[in-house]
Amino acid sequence: MKAQLQSQLTAILSDLQYPPVDVVFDRPKVEAHGDLTTNVAMMLAKAAGKPPRQVAQSIVEKLKVDDSFLASVEIAGPGFINFRFAQKYVVESAKKILQQGSLFGKSNAGKGKKTNLEWVSANPTGLLHAGHGRQVLLGQVIGNLLEWTGHAVTREYYFNNAGNQMRTLAESIYARYRQELGDEYPFPEEGYKGEYIVEIAKEIISLKGDSLRETDTERSYFKTFGEAWCFAKIKETLARLNVKHDVFFNEDSLYTSGKIKEVTEEFKKKDLAYDSEGAVWFRATKFGADKDRVIVKSTGEPTYRLPDIAYHREKFRRGFELIVDIFGADHIATIPDVLNGVQALGYDTKDVKVIIHQMVSFVHGEEIVKMSKRNAKTYTLDDLIDEVGVDAVAYFFVMRSVGTHLEFDIALAKEQSDKNPVYYLQYAHARIASILRHAESEEINVRDMEAMLSTTDFSLIKEKEEIDLLKKLLEFPELVQSCALSFEPHRLTTYLREVAETFHRFYHEHRVIAEDKKLMQARLTVCLMTKIVIANGCKILSVSCPEKM
RNA sequence: GGCCCCGUAGCUCAACUGGAUAGAGCAACAGCCUUCUAAGCUGUGGGUUGCAGAUUCGAAUUCUGCCGGGGUCACCA
């Protein structure tokens, strides 16, 4: 609808010989201002040498107002042009919702762009904790949004199994292993104190008994076993949330293939790295940092920066045109170094989109839930899913914009009532499903879209609440695009809430199942359209939409 | 202290990326079920958008300076 109006206006502007400008529309906040509004007249006023309202007048005169497209065009305020679509046009446009069904909302805005989405990437040294949920779901929904807008998305997990933390894991398990065998054995100071470490140790005992007590001096069995154990658990948790990665990129592979060395040498050649104090330093100060950074420790091991840089170069080499990374705010400091490094290697970092989400705090009603890392009893993502369910987890974590600190109210998420926004949305869907069941008992085949389209008298859709609803539904494809392009999934939750609200109002005002069969069928199509939009939206959100509640 | 994010109704947050009268939910109050799911709907009250300047037709949104909250500043990742 917007596109059609836009092309009309652009043609008119060139007819009138105004300088070319982007015609941008806004949705007015106030209903009296119509369905769409544009400020082109104000933009052009200076160049045209006329007051904005006069410019607006010249444009408006060229527009045709009838019931096939525009119901009204008005000049308002300092020079806004407000448009209102004709009801007939709205209803006609809405037919495509039925035609497209589960595809309604998909587009090719991304033009098949090869896109790499990396997220979660938690180290295999423990379980996902509740706070990880935000990242897990944000990535999931952003991935869905990118797919819905025609990006060729590779979902990737950077599997970080090199470096210090794996040694710490092995030592922690070994210490618990010895303790479980009844030995006095000190637990490493920086070790992982979680109860799962004990669990792992017990499993090792059941498999190997005490045979590893003295033999595995390298702790290689403990490392391998622990890594596999943690990773399996992480994958299990992700699977509960329907999160699937296409590629698990192994950090180790960067070492074995020599990619790490390659980067170091290239930096040295470009005088971006130098040796000092037995370590290799990256000239971060050349890129505006306050000091240079170590990329290879004096022990000969790289710091995380080097593999991260090498990894991102590989993403470019693998042919990705858009690279999306999702990180928590606690990783914020590492990002500039990596981006600078990648740029120094000759890649354009404008194709790298880094999404940083703020931290999550958990409350239980009034009470603050403590999530101490030192405490052995960490609140895991699994615990959270057990407590509030998959749908609430999925919805709550994307409900807020990434820039704000998220307060997750467990008591609210758990509550099966009108307070809970997830249920509000799902309830609308279930309500529609219920109406459709009644329709089927009236012998209307609501599943046959072809028949519904060809036999329904759409001119019977004319109540204000119906038209409002259809207008709302028709916003969906554009909304999906704008959420995807701006990487702002939370706007989808806001939108779906509005859809549910608009539907509930329609439901309240007008009966669907009624004596008048013609009217009933027309209204059933409105229900079907709403159901499609809610279902498609929930699909993107990874939230289920029940037929019954 | 440097850098990053945030500050909007009593609470949790929106605001289509610079638009017109800043909106929802919860909480409070008043109504609506013999009819398709009341997990719903309708209405009322509630604001100097942290403060002070600047930019322009127009600022919650952009810029500057303060104030307050969080994050981050390793030869950990």
Image: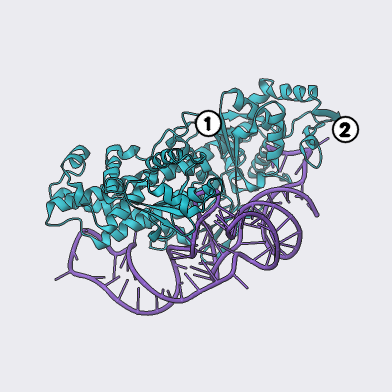
Chain colours: A cyan, B purple
Distance in Å between CA atoms under marks 1 and 2 = 40 Å
Q: Looking at the image, which residue is at 77% across and 22% down?
A: A265
Image position of A209 (left or right of A298): left
Residue B11: x %, y % from top left: 55, 67
Q: Is residue A166 visible?
A: yes
Q: Earlier in the sequence, mark 1 or mark 2?
A: 1
Chain letter, disc 2 residue = A
Mark 1 secondary-structure assignment: strand
Q: Specify the label residue A115 is tagged with.
A: 1
Other residues around mark 2 within 10 Å, as few (<14) / some (14–19) / many (≥20): few
Give the answer, above or below, for where A75 lies relative to A263. below
Kindly identify the residue that appears in the image at 44 percent across and 39 percent down. A10
Q: Is residue B43 left or right of residue B35?
A: right
**Residue positioned most to the right:** A277
Q: Which residue is mark 2?
A: A277
Residue nearest the viewer, comparing A367 with A179: A367
Mark toward the viewer: 1 or 2: 1
Q: At x 76% / y 36%, what residue is drawn?
A: A287
Inspect the image, locate mark 2, and give the three-letter code of the amino acid beneath it.
Answer: Glu
Depth check: give the residue in front, A220 or A267: A267
Residue type at mark 1?
Thr
Image side of residue A458 versus residue B54, left or right: left
Task: Report x, y in % for residue A517.
Answer: 12, 52
* Quadrant (top left, top right, bottom left, bottom right) of the C terminus of chain A: bottom left
Chain at numbered mark 1:
A
